[in-house]
Amino acid sequence: MDSRTFLQKMGEITENDDKDLSLEMLLEDIKGWNSLAMVTFMAISDSEFGVSVKARDMRRAKTVRDLYDIVADRGSK
Amino acid sequence: MISKLSGVNIKAICCTVPRNVLRVASLGSIWSENEIRRVIKASGIEEIRIADEKTTAADLCVKAAENIFKELHLSKDSVDGIVFVTQTPDYIAPATSCILQSRLSVPNEVVAIDINHGCNGYIYGVFLSSMLVTSGSCKRVLLMAGDTISKLLSPYDRSLRTVLGDGGSATIVEKGEGDLSFRIRTDGKRYDSLIVPAGGMRVPHSEETCMSREMENGNYRSKEHLFMDGIEVMKFALSDVPILVEQLLSDVGWAKTDVGCYIFHQANKFIIDYVARKMKLNAMTVPVAVQKYGNTGPASIPLTLVQKFAENSSDHNALKKMVAVGFGVGFSWGAFTGDLSETQFLRVQEL
């Protein structure tokens, strides 16, 4: 999956325009990145990208790129 | 655990909810309107029922049971087993099922068992009731399953207050020609992802344990309130539940498309939709009935069945091949298959 598709998904999850998001952004700076968004991310990763995200990895993620790496890395295997 | 039990039927189901309605949107005054709107959109839960101070899960279940006896003209003397599933018993001791024997005027010649399980509790209840019947020990078991979980919630816990509601159910499990097949699993390693940490014997009640303080994400609760790690629970639902259901289907030789109705524990719309999508189930066969009552724990499977099938016009053919699926606190998860097309479903009662 390319980073653009990923940012679009992140936009849907957090109710933001994906043009306002970038891989370098800190998750804590994104309005709408809350516990519900985290659970949604986990569900979408699993059912749409076929990647089972570990809760621990998810909590460690600081930036959007950290999340993207989780999905992109494992999704390609 | 795998088990096929022959010679048992689920004769009737009725449910009771408290009269008191809490509109989830009204919680927007405590938190932000926008946040509540997003939560409702995802959970599908618009209203939940909250028991008043005096009402317990046993009270809700008694009303449901009395209604079955009345509507089906069943004699209470015919009941020789009582199974009560709850996380909110009347007392620490004795078992609430004992008290229920007397309240319902069921004969003394009855086995009475409490089961402490939550969202997988109905599967346990049907399993144990069916065991009692198919072993020849009982002819007719009154299974009651319900929680007044609101009594274990912090008023300021935004993750749980918006989804969990109170409810009770009664089910008659009796000798018959039917088969029920079960799969049940347990993983106690994850026990602390859904837990009331204090108030039991491990961490007894104290001044400290009942003091509310700010935990994660601005949630306030004490150690005597229910805690849920939403991410762990979501992962559990998505990864463990589909595998178990698929194995059960293979046990009984049913294809996914053979099944007319999948009754999942009604955690929330979000989880059910994702699990159904992941399993590639036809959405028409997966009812979501959370809108009016939310997640009612051990009562959610029977409450879904009665909401969908209590109307005279409803088509019970879909229940010829039915799968019920529970998952929750423990962690515990399980499912059973059966033919419920002859089961009588009574309308939801209020107390």
Image (cartoon, coloured by chain):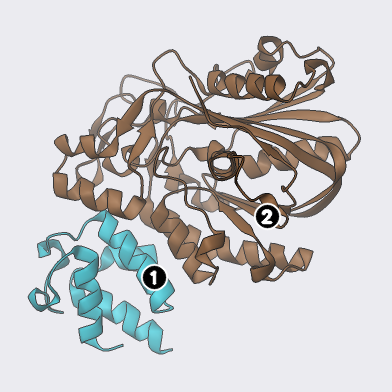
Colour-to-chain, brown? B
Residue to which mark 1 is pinned: A53
Q: Secondary structure at mark 1?
A: loop
Residue B172 percent coordinates (x, y):
73, 32
The answer to whether residue B24 shows anywhere in this view is yes
Image quadrant occupied by the N terminus of chain B? bottom right
Mark 1 crowd level (few <14, some 14–19, many ≥20, 10 Å Cα) = many
Q: Is residue B170 left or right of residue B160?
A: right
Single out the mark in the foreground, 2 or 1: 2
Q: Residues within 10 Å of mark 2 (few under 14, many from 20)?
A: many
The part of the image, by quadrant, that contains residue B94 is top right
The chain whose colour is cyan is A
The amino acid at mark 2 is: Met
Residue reaching furthest to the right: B136
Q: Horizontally, is B341 left or right of B92 in the view?
A: right
- Which disc is residue B322 wearing? 2
- List x then y, in percent, for residue B3: 79, 53
Residue nearest the viewer, comparing B111 with B253: B253
Residue B242, above or below B55? below
Residue drawn at the location 75% of the way across and 44% of the way down: B342
